[in-house]
Amino acid sequence: MRIVRFSPGPDSGLGTDPLFGVLEDDATITVITGDPIYSGIQKTAATVQVSKVRLLAPVIPRSKVVCIGKNYADHAAEMGGVVPEEPIIFLKPNTSVIGPNDTIVWPEMSQRVDHEAELAIIIGRLCKDVPVERVNDVIFGYTIANDVTARDLQTKDGQWTRAKSFDTFCPIGPWIDTDFIPGTQKISATINGEVKQSASLNDMIFKVPEIINFVSRVMTLLPGDIILTGTPAGIGPMVAGGQATMAIEGLGELTNKVSNK
């Protein structure tokens, strides 16, 4: 099942407040009541055409975005590092989250803003110290993310917080797929029509069960928390004024524009 969050259009007859819905096909959304992470998936009789709404980030990021660094061996190598012995964790603020077709804003502080295609896990319940064999109990679903990074600031600062934390630096979407099972699906990043990253999700060093187990031993995870699982090799600058598309086979595509400097 694919869950979307959307802003109804003026001629949709659904008001102006953002709503959640189930994407029934490429054209139709069935409206559901409340936030499905908290209220469950309860369909209403109301439907709307996708063409009449604007898709938003498919989860309301109330708490945090947890990220895993250097989780593909080829990316660790291109960053001049070795394969980590355990997951490397960093955070992005929830204020960095935007949705599909929103604009990534190039910060004045940076001269180089990079793309990083990633699989994102959406947590569905409060949890701590989750055993590997129980991780599916706490996953609501999966979506696509772009871990946007001001690479020059990452190098300058010697750590990642500023470089990863600007507003608009965490596009996610276009929906949450509750049935997706990570395996050998292809993950890619295309910048202005040119493929820059291409790998398999199976290339991840630490798989989803290990990631959730490890992170939940460090911090309590809350409903709606987002976990980015790392990016493969091929990271590089996005073009000011251009377009970036992150894709995962079976999940879809996440496209965002990049503002001019």
Image: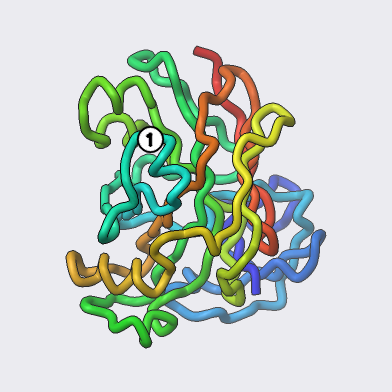
Foreground residue among 153 and 79: 79
Q: Is residue 105 above or below residue 11?
A: above
Q: Is residue 126 above or below residue 239?
A: below
Q: Tell me the element at label 1.
A: loop
- Tell me the colour scheme of the image: rainbow
Residue at x 42% of width, y 14% of height:
111
Measuring from the top left, give residue 260's x and y in whole percent. Answer: 55, 15
Q: Quadrant of the N terminus?
A: bottom right
Q: Is residue 100 above or below residue 17?
A: above
Identify the residue at the far left of this view: 218
Please give left or right for residue 15 compared with residue 109 in the image: right
Q: Amino acid at mark 1?
A: Met
Measuring from the top left, give residue 120's x and y in whole percent. Answer: 47, 58
Q: How many numbered markers are drawn?
A: 1
Residue at x 64% of width, y 23% of height:
242
Please give left or right for residue 75 compared with residue 191 in the image: left
Residue at the spot of label 1: 79
Residue at x 32% of width, y 30% of height:
163
Residue 48 in sight from this viewpoint = yes
Q: Few, some or many C-alpha atoms within 10 Å of disc 1 (few <14, some 14-19, many ≥20)? A: few
Measuring from the top left, give residue 234's x and y in whole percent. Answer: 54, 36
Please give left or right for residue 41 compared with residue 59 in the image: right
Residue at x 60% of width, y 40% of height:
197
Residue 101 in sight from this viewpoint = no
Asked which quadrant contains residue 249, the reply is: bottom right
